[in-house]
Image (spheres, coloured by chain):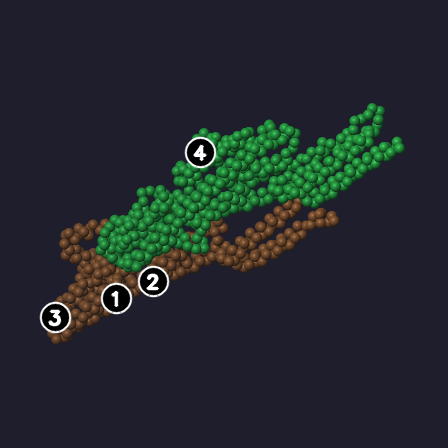
Chain colours: A green, B brown
Amino acid sequence: MGISNLLQTGRSSMTAAKTAIATAGHNIANANTEGFSRQRVEQSAASGSPKPGSRAEIGRGVNNVSVSRINDEYVEKQIRNSTRDLGHAEEKDLFLRQTEDVFNELNGEGLNRLMTRFFNEFRKLGNEPDNEAVRQSVRESTKALVNDIKRMRGEVDEVRRHIDSRLDGYVREMNSLSEELRDLNLKIKVASVQGGLPNDLLDRRDQVLKHLGSFADLQMHKDNEGGYVVNIKGVGPLVAGPTFNKFSTERSPADDQGKMVDSLDLKTEASANGNVTHLVSGGKMGALLETRDKLLSTIVDRLDQLAFGLSESVNMVHRQGFNRYGQQGADFFKPLESADRASERIDLSDEVKTNVNSIATAAEPESPGDNRIAIAISGLQGQKLLNEGKATIDDFYNSIVSDIGVANARNRSVMTQQKDIATQLGKIREQVSGVSIDEETANLLQFQHSFDASAKVIQVADECLKTILELKR
Amino acid sequence: MRVTENTNFGVVRDSVRKSRERLENLQMQSATLKKLNTPSDDPIGSAKVLEIRTEKMNNEQFLNNIKLTETFLSNSDHAVGELADIMVRAKEIALGQASGASSNEDTRLGLSEEVTQLFLQGVAAANRRIGERYLFGGYRSNTAPISNQGRYQGDDGQIMAEVSKDVFVSMNVPGIDIFNTNPKGALADRESMESATELKQADGRAPAQEGRRREFKLSGDETTENVNFFDELQTLRIGLLTGDLDAIRGTLERFDSMHGKLIATRAKIGSRIQGLQTTQGALERHTLTNATLSSSLEDADMAQVVSDLAKEETVFRSSLASSQKLVQPTLMDFLR
């Protein structure tokens, strides 16, 4: 073997060392990059060509130098799932907290107190049916009650609007991620065909998949060219080859599956009738839709029933009574035809609004001391008027509060659990793919030494050549 | 196991965050003195707390109702007592003038003047009111129950007050039950006096009618003769004026039965007041029990909170201190 081969060996090893140093540098640079997998130089020894009869086979340095990433696909998949479930719980938590705030009266005023006050005002009126000041205070306490029911309805609607605006944002984010995934698939394919290992593109794609997967329940698998095909469970393909399915939102009327009026519908370009609102589940979007169409709409429904039940039953008694003018049959609340939007429309009747003496207290005319109607109305507090005769108005409202509390508490424990899982998986990923500065520093030194040594090899080869060239002189 | 710097920092961040979370929760509890701050802290407990609050507010109202009912009843008691005294005095007069031996025209004329005064006193007592409300008019609480002629102008309405959940006590005694020994007879008298059209109107009072009828069946023996307080005083007065000793003697027994009726009414009122006091005691005990229950549900155990807070602070400090150890210098720092 010739001296020039020795130069070649030195050169190849210098290149390998330089690559390794550069890779260590790249790792250190990306130590804090989210989703980065540490990279490693892989190389193999270049064998020499054996000469017949010679037993000294001399290698020719190092070749097949490549950089690969250290990454466990299974861990990535688990991380994707846990990101999705954590996102689901966190998103729900955000809105459950907001909803809970609407109904929280443990540290202050609220509908429960106002309802009790309302019935007690009628008890006071029963004590003094001929006292106009008490009548005024009955009217004021009713106004406060009505306003609070409306406030709740309004605030729940505010939460609903907040959910919708977030949904809109997520749809846009999801579209841009789908597009990016499609492009990444393409780039990775091209790079692979050219024989490269596009490590950083692969990392980026894992990140995109993770983000995309946090929005909804997705199924993903690799096609035979290494591209990812993503389907949304229950809806159909999201990204496949060169196409991606674009989502959009649309304001639309209420539907029979719990979507409230003016809420956003979710649409896709690809699916048959376009509307996939009730098909998407899981992830952040699933959480939004679930909170909006199951929880919030049930709450609004129950508020409506409460408002309707209250105004109907009070009216029913009140209509039998006689007011201060000996007239019978007036309503106390403005009559509502149905429970539909009752919590928005509940109000005092015009008669009572304009004149407190229109409040009926007596069961017979010209009996200013007769309090039977007032007492009958206060007695409604203990009657099971709602939920098909199973709940008093108080019970009914308290059960709304405790149901929200239960939903929130349950979700919070799920969230804590998911957070722990995510932390644990993060640690596992860090264990496999994370960059350790200590390791990289040691590697740097190691490769620096090997770089020095390779240079030395070239120097020695050079000196050898010099010696040989000087032989002739 | 490979441990990287990111793992280290992650652990630091995580433990500090968790510790801060617990600290905040304890801080909240010690600031509000409550362990229940949102329904989700204890959903079932918070529904119970709401229920207890409703009960508490209701009980306060019931206590107010009791106070009012008691005032109404004791005022009624005083007035009925006055009426009874009048009866006693009237009977004394009648007894004194019942026989010709002790009676002469001069004394009779003088005494008839006293009986007139007794009559007026009786009207005043029967028209006693609290504020604008007459005690004995039944539901017709805005008009004087007894006219100057001694006619009853009220009705037999029982004004009920809720003194405890679903427990009602009548806060008034309708005059018709006081001034007559047999109200049923009195009503028959009155109805016969009222015109037929008025009677029809009365029948039209749908919800009240049934209650009234029942009320009458309860009170008094239907067969006994009715004695009216004011009628009897009139009889005595006319007897004294005309010197009709038989008529005067005739009033004696009826004054007795009227007096008996008034005493019975006082006894009825007294037992109602006693019942109210028992109810009041029960309500106060109930309020106390509720307060204890609600406190155990929503109040933070301060000793516990404070000691937890101290403990958590130690945890927090040590997690910060250990972070210092965890965030070790890297190999870099030693390669100079």
Drawn side of residue B77 relative to residue B192, left or right: right
Real-space Cα distance between discs 4 and 1?
79 Å
- Under mark 1, the amino acid is Ala
Q: Quick one: label 2, few (<14), some, or many (20+) residues within 10 Å? A: some
Amino acid at pointer 3: Leu
Q: Which residue is mark 4?
A: A275
- Which callout, 1 or 3, points to the residue nearer the camera? 1
- Front residue of B3 and B75: B3
- Inter-mark Cα distance, 4 to 3: 102 Å
Q: Earlier in the sequence, mark 1 or mark 3?
A: 1
Position in image of residue A435 (x %, y %): 66, 42
Who's the residue at 17% across and 62% down the image?
Answer: B151
Subunit of mark 2?
B
Which structural element holds mark 4? loop
Residue beneath disc 1: B79
Checking the image for residue B67, the label placed there is 2
Image quadrant assignment for residue B107: bottom left
